[in-house]
Amino acid sequence: MDTPASPLRLSLAPGNGRRVLVTGASGYIGGRLIPELLAAGFTVRASARNIERLHSRAWSGQVELAEADLQSPEQVRAAMDGVHTMLYLVHSMGQGDDFISREQQIARTVAAAAAEAGVAQIVYLGGLHPGGELDSLSDHMRSREQVGRILLAAAVPALVLRAGVVIGSGSVSFEMIRHLADLLPVMPGPRWLNNRIEPIAIRDVLYYLAHASALPEPVNDDVGIGSGQVLRFRDMLTAYGQVAGLPRRRVLALPVPAPRLSGFWITMTTPIPRGIAMPLAASMAQDAVTTDHRIAEIIPDPPDGLTSYRQACRRAIQRQLAGQVTVTWDHDVQAEADPADPLPSDPQWAGHTVFTDVRQRHGAAAPEAVWQVVEGIGGENGWYSPAILWRVRGLLDRASGGHGLGRGRRDPHHLQVDDHVDFWRVESITPGRSLTLRSEMRAAGRAWLQLTVRPGADGGTDYRQRAIYFPRGLLGRLYWGVLVPFHALIFPTMARNILRAAQRDGA
């Protein structure tokens, strides 16, 4: 049988209509795996806790959508109805004080629901670690190990695939490497920079997951997956610099063992928020190398061989420069957002205290030219107002554990729902008309920025800019009061310069 077409040109096993359930479909791995499964001919059911996050995906019309909180046995059982293989691609990255017990409970719920629904195979993507006693592992890695053990001991056969550092455009591991190498010609860091790491390209992770969905017979086993190439983390940083064409990078591994201090170092030098940087740094404190290649007994190596680290970096850079990164690691973070949180579209009588800053201006440029500037805002294009004020706010946000300005944009020219724009997130977008950005800055409240473009009555464009803030408690009200003078400098200038840029570009 001919090899099905693959978006990433992977060699895929035919799915033959087999129904697979992809949990965590809004996340980094799940969002990239689904197009490959569809290309292979699987019937795909995609689940997420908030199904609205799946509607903007290009593949949403080709899959069965299921809203399922994995802590709910009823919802999980319904999502598994008629499923042959269940892909378990969710984990909490250390979110909350009780995440270990919560993840164990979710694993038991999933295992029981799978048995009740008659699922034939569970595939779980776990973490690669050196083994040993559970107490010797970080909280994050120990939790993933316990989930794997629960699934392996359950009634439904489980294939646990253990991966280490995943290299690909948008992955948290790659983003950490890229930002560290791009930013720092001399990189002092914690002593785990000397640890031995076996990276794996995202394309190879997807290859293994897709083939695991097509296994002819159920498998209950625990195997590591990697590139077969073992590097020290410091060498991964310098090799990335060489691939990216950067001047020589020097890495200094200092005797700093403290995971919390290491996590703070990652937070301050990369766009990775503290909630992910802390467990990431803790898991980096140990080697992550496969001990054998038993995976080849279950799934053969790709016909062209496994992807080397340098190849994976080269592909990741090319995809990011081309604006082809549609799903990134922070989608996993956003999957935890509460759909019941207030929105700027809520009516004013809904009970929230709301502060706003509204600016309206008319410009001579055509609406299409103004919209082009609006959709390109942020990232390298900036915010059309005093850059120093935005940089200061970004540094304060980074210091308090937020994203700061380091994330930039996925695509320099186009936006879609859930894209990040520096420390904002695209809440909604109506092309040519309106853009709503939701703030992800650390603040005592929630904030949005709405930019609206309308044709003027006598030609030109009516531009409206509205900042919205829902304060939380007294501190939130004080926060808004402190920022009012800065808003008086930023927002009028921003509105004026957006229209000027549109007129200049249009001319």
Image: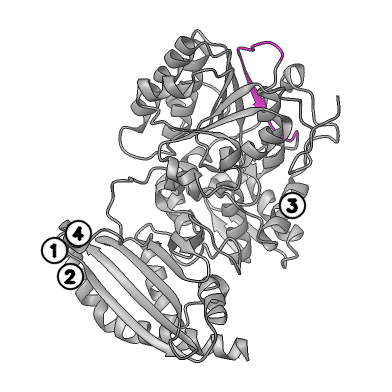
Element on which disc 4 rests: loop
Is the residue marked by circle 2 packed among few (<14), some (14-19), or many (20+) residues within 10 Å? few
Earlier in the chain: of badge 2 and badge 4, it is 4
Q: Is residue 469 left or right of residue 75?
A: left
Identity of the residue drawn at 48% across and 10% down? 115
Q: In the image as oriented, which residue stretches furthest toward the front? A: 457
Cα distance in 3D space between marks 3 and 4: 43 Å
Question: Compared with residue 408, is residue 98 higher up or lower down, i.e. above or below?
Answer: above
Contact? badges 1 and 2 (CB < 8 Å): yes
Q: Which residues are magenta?
A: 216-228
Residue type highlighted by circle 4: Arg
- The secondary element bearing badge 2 is classed as helix
Can you give x and y, in whole percent of width and height, for residue 150 in the image?
A: 46, 16
According to the picture, the residue beneath numbered tag 3 turns out to be: 315
Q: Which mark is residue 478?
A: 2
Label 1 to label 2: alpha-carbon separation: 6 Å
**In front here: 234 or 502?**
502
